[in-house]
Amino acid sequence: MQGIAAGPPAHQSNNQHRPVLELVLKRKQDPARKPLGTILQEMGVLSEDALLHALELQATQSGMLGDILLSHGLVSEENLATALSRQYGTSFFSTDHPLPDPDLIDALSVQRCIKLSCLPWARAGGVTIVAVAQPARFDVIKPELEALFGPLAMVLISESDLHATLLKIRRTRLALWAETCVAQAESCRMLQSQQFSVRLRWGLLVVAGLVLLAPELALLGLTLLVMGFLLIISTLKLAAALAVQRAPATGKAADSPKITALRKPVVSIMVPLYKEPKVVPRLINRLSRLTWPRELLDILLVVEENDHATLAALSDCDLPRWMRVIPVPDAPLKTKPRALNYAMLFARGPIIGVYDAEDAPDPDQIHRVVACFQNGPPSLACVQGVLDFYNARTNWISRCFTIEYATWFRIVLPGMQRLGLAVPLGGTTLFFRRDILEKLGGWDAHNVTEDADLGIRLARHGYYTQLLETVTLEEANCRAIPWVKQRSRWLKGYAVTWLVHMRAPRLLWRQLGSWKFFGFQVLFLGTLLQFMFAPLLWSFWLIVFGLGHPLPGIAGSTIMQSFGFIFLFSEAVSLVIGYLALHSRQHRSLRLWLPTLHFYFPLAVLAVYKALWELVSAPFYWDKTAHGEHEAACDAVTVVQTRPSTT
C-alpha cells in the first residue's frame, strides 16, 4: 500500500466522473511524475534527513515509501494524501461518492478487487474509472484490468474506503465465500447432511449389537485392535524421538537460518478473538514486543461483528497504525476458520501468520520465520512454531498439559517431520506462504480442528511444513470440565478430518504415498480408537487385584503375555519421551509429575465420548475455550494506553 489512509479532500463533490476522466487523460499526455518524497519536501512537511532515512529503509524492504513515512511518524495521513493526489494528477474517491457499478465489480470478482486493491467504479465516455489504493502498482495490474474493461482512468481511494465500499455492495457474497472457499471434495461441510448422521448412527449400533450378541469375541477383537494401534503408535513415537535425538545438528541448521539479502516482506498476522475483552490490553502489549519493522507488520484483530464486548475493548485502546480491526459479518456458522478465511481477504503480506488471543510469542519470532521461508524450497508452505504455557504450575492439570505439549511440539511433531510424515498443524504460531494458502482455499470453515485438516491438505498437494524452534507461550486449560470440552472439540475434529480425507482412500493413497498414508491412519484413527476403547485396557487392572478377567479363558497365555508386553512397552516409551521433552531448565522439575499422567489421560476418554455424540448431533458446533484467567502469570511490562470510556 502507498500509505493512502486519509479520506478525500473536502472540496470534492459526489459526482465527478467526467471531470476526473478529463484530468486523467490530460495527465497521460505528460506521464513524468515527481517522486513522492520530492513533493512532500516541496510542501514543506518532510525534511531531507527524514526522507533519506525512509529511502534507506525502503532499499531493504518491500514496503512502500508512504507506509514507511507514516509508520515512523514522519508525515501525517492528510499530507501524504495531498502529495499522492499531486503526484498522480488525480483526485480521491470515497464512500461519499455514489456507489460503484456492481456489474463491473462482478466482472473482476470481489475477491480480486480486494487482492489488487482496486475498484472498477463506473464507465464514462467509453473509459472505465478505476479507484486504486496502491497507485504505485497500477502499471502492474493495468494489463489485467484493460483486458476486462478496455481503456482505464485511475483515481485514488483509501484502502479503508475501498473495503467499506465493497462491503456495502457484496458483503453477503464475501461472507458466503469464507464458508465455502475450500473445495467441497476436501471440506467437511457435507457432514451436516441427514444421510451422514443416519449412516454414523447405524455404524455405532452395529458395533453395540456385536458386543451384545458375542461379548467375549467382541471383547477379544476390540482388545486386539486397540493393542495393535497402541503398539504402532508407541513404536512411531519412539522412532520420532530417535530421529530428533540423532539429527540435532540438522534441526538446528534448519531452525536457525539467516535472513538473505532479499528485501524483507510485509507479514500479516491474523488474531481471531471471540468474547475475549479481558485479553485485549495484554494481547496488544505482547504483539507490540515483536521486533519486526513496524512498516512491514500487518496485524489483523479478527472479531465477530456482534461481539460487542470485545469490539468495545478494542475501541478503548489506541491501536498503532500497524494493527487494525476486521469485523466478521454475522452468520449462523461462527468458527475460527471462517473468521480466518474472511480476514485473509484483507491481509496485505505474502506471508500470513496466525496467533491466538492469549499468545505471547518470542519477540524475534517473525525474523526467524521469514528467514526460514527465504532459505526454504518452494514446496515449504508452512512454518510451525513451538507452543508452551506460561501458567504451567497453576495446578496438576496445567502441569500435565505442559508435559503433553512439550512431548508433542518438541519430540513427536519434529520427529514426524524428519521421518517424512504429514504434520498436523497446531492452531497457532502458524505462518504460510499466502499464494499456497489461497491455492488450497484457506481453512475449512466447518472443521473444528481446521489446523490439523490443513496440515493434511498441504501434504496431499505436495507441500510440507517446517517445525521451527521459536516459542509462543499461551494459557493452559487447567480446569477439568473446560479441559474435557476443549479436548472433545479436538477429538471431534480428528474424527471429522479422518472421515473427510477417507472419502476417496485410493486418491488419498496416491497423493500422500504409502508412508504418509500409513502415518495418517495411525495418527488420526489410532488416536480416536485408543481413547474410545481405553476402558478395555483399564480392565486388566482386574487381574492385578485378583478379581478375574474373561480374556485369559478365550485368548490364551501367549496373547495375554503379548498384551502385557505391549502395555509395559507403551508406558516405558511415554515416560522416556516425556523425560526427553522436559530437558529445558524451566521444565526439568516437571519430570517428577510424569507418572501422574496415568490419571490425566483418562479425562480424554470422557472427551472422546462427548465428541462422538456431537459428531452425530452437532458436527460443526465449536465449544469455545475461555481465555484470560491466568494472564498475570505471563506479563509484566508495558501497559496499553487507553482512551477514557464514554460509557
Image (tube, helix red, strand yellow):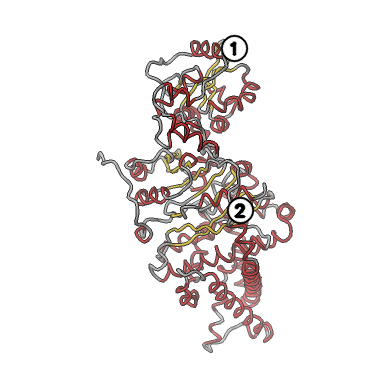
Residue 470 percent across, percent down from the top left = 52, 57
Q: Earlier in the sequence, mark 2 or mark 1?
A: 1
- Residue 63 % position (x, y): 52, 36
Q: Nearer the viewer, residue 643 or 79?
A: 79
Residue 580 appears in which quarter of the rendering?
bottom right
Q: Is residue 499 above or below residue 582?
A: above
Q: Is residue 39 above or below residue 387?
A: above
In the structure shown, which secondary structural element does the residue marked by tag 2 occupy? helix
Name the residue furthest front.
49
Identity of the residue drawn at 53% across and 49% down? 367
Pointer 2 residue: 455
- What whole-number distance in Å separates the C-alpha atoms at marks 2 and 1? 48 Å
Q: Amino acid at mark 1?
A: Gly
**Residue at numbered disc 1:** 126
Give the image quarter of residue 576.
Answer: bottom right
The crowding category of the residue bearing disc 2, from other C-alpha atoms within 10 Å (few below 14, some 14 to 19, many at least 20), is many
Secondary structure beneath label 1: loop
Does any portion of residue 496 appear in the rendered image?
no
Q: Are marks 2 and 1 in contact (CB under 8 Å)?
A: no
Q: Quick one: quadrant of the C terminus?
A: top left
Instruction: Bin the neighbour count of mark 1 within 10 Å (Cα to Cα): few under 14, some 14-19, many 20 and up.
Output: few
Residue 313 in the image, given as x and y percentages of width and height: 33, 44
| 405 vs 317: above or below | below
One can see residue 535 in this view: yes
Q: Amino acid at mark 2?
A: Gly
- What is the x, y in percent for residue 374? 61, 47
Left or right of residue 478, residue 113 in this image: right
